Image: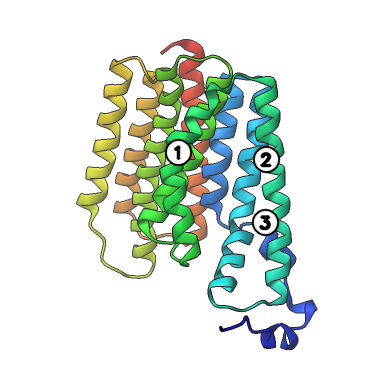
Amino acid sequence: MPVMSTASQRSTPTSRVSIRSIALPTEHGGWGFTLEPILLGLLVAYSAAAWELSVAALAVFLARRPFRLLMTDLVRRRWLRRTSVAASFAFGYGLLALLGLVGALVTAPSRFLLAYVAAAPFAAVALVADTKSKSRTLVAELAGSIAMGATATAIALADWWAVGEAFGLWLVLAGRAVATIALVRGQIRRVHDKPVRPAAIHATQAATVATMALAALLGFVPWLAVVAMAGIWLLAVISLRRPPVPARVVGWTQMATGLAVVVLTAAGVWMDW
């Protein structure tokens, strides 16, 4: 039976292992898709459980990178210095997520688990992609970002929101994820002088706005959420007509866009519009 190689571990000095690069994700988009549901949940359904579920969600996000590195090394049958570090952080973050979840079960009704049951298929797709080092594919990016949006719904359910309205928050965040990922991928392709299909991007934006409008008509999301989706479409129209900008500018712009979606949606909930 093949065994894991330790040769790389012996040849890799400890000083070359960047703990920060293992412990902290560097993607702007990932931080946004994690913090936006937390912020939205805290703004519209504040409770003790909201903080506990927020800690759990943040811990899950932080655990993703060390877990990915750990699985990559295990699949390749090797154990490096970074593998040990990654395993330690993955375990620590996982334990923190578990503590947050248990705390929420103590302080809130267990109905919030419905959100995680619904998110499980998306999380599974993202997890499988991580183990195969394919987390940058469109399907993996969409699945991971949509799964994280369940945090807002869990927080709302823990605060005794109606199921439809609680899942409406998730719908807003999922719409934001689909719209912005389609736009960002197009913008990045333009930066690298690759072909882009603006019509497909605009079709995605139109479908997102239409879906949100239907949800607003049914009373599941506030109308300001529709305005927020329309704003993302307007941004797509403007950005695709201008010269490409650096990837870091795209990242920061999308973080600002996500914050605007959260603020508008929260304002719509407060004003009932």
Residue beneath disc 3: 90
Q: Amino acid at mark 1?
A: Ala
Amino acid beneath label 3: Ala
Q: Quadrant of residue 43?
A: top right
Residue 143 lies, in percent from the top left, at 41, 48
Asked whether residue 260 is in view, the answer is no
Say above or below: 76 vs 136: below
Q: Residue 19: percent from the left, percent from the top? A: 74, 65
Up/down of 133 relative to 233, above or below: below
At horizontal 40% and vertical 22% (from top left) the residue drawn is 224
Residue holding disc 2: 98
Callout 2 secondary element: helix
Q: Secondary structure at mark 3?
A: helix
Looking at the image, residue 92 sits to the left or right of residue 131; the answer is right
Residue ranking furthest to the top: 272
From this view, report whether residue 271 is shown above or below residue 96.
above
Q: Which residue is mark 1?
A: 119
Asked if the residue at tag 2 contacts the one at tag 1, i.e. Cβ–Cβ closer than 8 Å, the answer is no
